[in-house]
Image: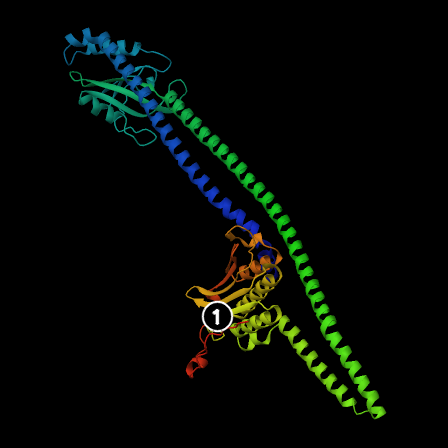
Amino acid sequence: MARLFAFLRARLQLNYAQKLFFLATIPLVLAVAAISLVVANQARQLAEREISVLETQLIEAKKRELNNYIQLARTAFFAEYGRAAPDDAVAKERVTQILAAMIYDRDGFFFVYHYDGTNLVSPRQTDLIGRNWAGRLDRNGVPVVDELIRIARSGGGYHTYDWEKPSTGEAERMITYVVGLQDWQWALGTGIFIDDVLANVAAARAVTEERVARTFFWIGAITLAALLAVFGSGLIINIRERRLADAKLKALTQRVLDTQEEERGRVARELHDSISQLLVGIRYALELARRRVQAGDPRAEDNIGKGIDGLNGAIQEVRRISRDLRPGQLDDLGLGPAIHALTEEFTKRTGIKADLKTVVFRNRLAPDAKIALYRIAQEALTNIERHAQATEVHVDLFGHKTGATLRVADNGRGLASSPDLGPAAGGLGLRNMQERVEQLDGTLRVFSSERGTRIDATVPLSHILPPDPDRAAGPQPQPQPRKARA
């Protein structure tokens, strides 16, 4: 089971591109779902209002038709009813015959109930005649005869209930209009089945649901097309970005290899041009001293002294090469003394006057920040030596509330006529500076004009370490800012 969970976890783990795709598509899907629900709800509400209006209009038309039927029936027996006494059995018989004969359409007829519930007229359902139906309910529990009698006693009105349809024998919804013949205590009425109205309403609702379903289908199709478009564009962008990243990675790898080869070549030249020649001279001096010692020549001591001097020079040259590769002062004393030694060496080697002004950091810069700023200063001085044709260089190293800044300025001929050049305008050296600063989330700014060039490298406050409590406990000497001059 644990292996299964581990397998599923590994399978369901999303990469960056998949996370980005889901981040883009989930809000789209949620928005489309919300829009679909709102559209469907609004469509149903609008359709329901239209269907309700249609149903009301159809039923009102049926009611007007029933009213007309009742008026026709009253006109047919009014002469008999108007002059008859309340107990005139002959007149009642003639009226029932008239009403029994008045059938219309396929299922239309007139019915009469005595106020006690006895059916007197029902031409299409003769089995009801002569029987008392007081208390009869339809299949939904709605009172039928009692309600008809109550409406007739009150003067007349409409009543809706389920009744057996004569043509089919099935219970259908029916609307009746009933009036009261108060002298005879009769409830006279007629009804119309509204199954056609209900069928039309149901058909309208079915059409509405079909439209809603069709709307959902098209919204889903459009959403799917949008998702496919997002997926396709994301796939294309991802492939393109991967190709660009691969190209940049190859270029970076090649640059690293070129830099390594360049550094190896430089170290090889240094060893060949300086160390190798010094060692050859020492060997010649020592060989000559050995021959003179064997010959008893007193000048052998002079040759030994020259060999020792040459050996001291070789030792100093090894130290210089080691310092160029990785200055020990950078780790032991901090960035300020390391740059101080760098500027002094620069002045001795080139004859260009160099000033260094620095504020003591108490070695609080992070190791990566110290290395980056030192290499930037080293690269900047190398560029000045090779290209600037400057006579003065000013190096400032100071901290501030947002981090630490290294500033290298010269009075040379400048990079170009533009007063403010981005790092991309320079060569490989400036690109190396820019990459070192970007790795620290810092900034590199290059200002150049005909009066000289200034490079500002700033590292953020996150690369400055908090004060060491052990050092803060005891008294600390207050070193003065160093200044290196030619």
Q: Please tell me whether residue 388 is drawn above or below residue 72 in the rendered image.
A: below
In the picture provided, is 449 more to the left or to the right than 236? left
User: In the figure, residue 84 lies in which quadrant?
Assistant: top left
In the picture provided, is 90 more to the left or to the right than 424? left
Q: Please tell me whether residue 284 is drawn above or below residue 223 in the rendered image.
A: below
Residue 354, image x and y in percent? 54, 68
Q: Nearer the viewer, residue 110 or 259?
A: 259
Residue 419, image x and y in percent? 50, 52
Q: Nearer the viewer, residue 343 or 325?
A: 343
User: In the figure, residue 254 lies in which quadrant?
Assistant: bottom right
Q: Please tell me whether residue 82 is drawn above or below residue 361 in the rendered image.
A: above
Residue 114, image x and y in percent? 22, 20
In the picture provided, is 117 more to the left or to the right than 470? left
Color style of the picture: rainbow
Does residue 15 appear anywhere in the picture? no
Mark 1 neighbour class, 10 Å CA radius: few under 14, some 14 to 19, many 20 or more:
some
Q: Amino acid at mark 1?
A: Lys
Q: Please tell me whether residue 335 is drawn above or below residue 470 in the rendered image.
A: above
Does residue 427 appear anywhere in the picture? yes
- Please state, as top left, top right, bottom left or bottom right, where the N terminus lies in the image: bottom right
Image point (22%, 8%), residue name: 75
Q: Nearer the viewer, residue 33 or 235?
A: 235
Q: Nearer the viewer, residue 470 or 376?
A: 376
Residue, disc 1: 357
Image point (70%, 83%), residue name: 309
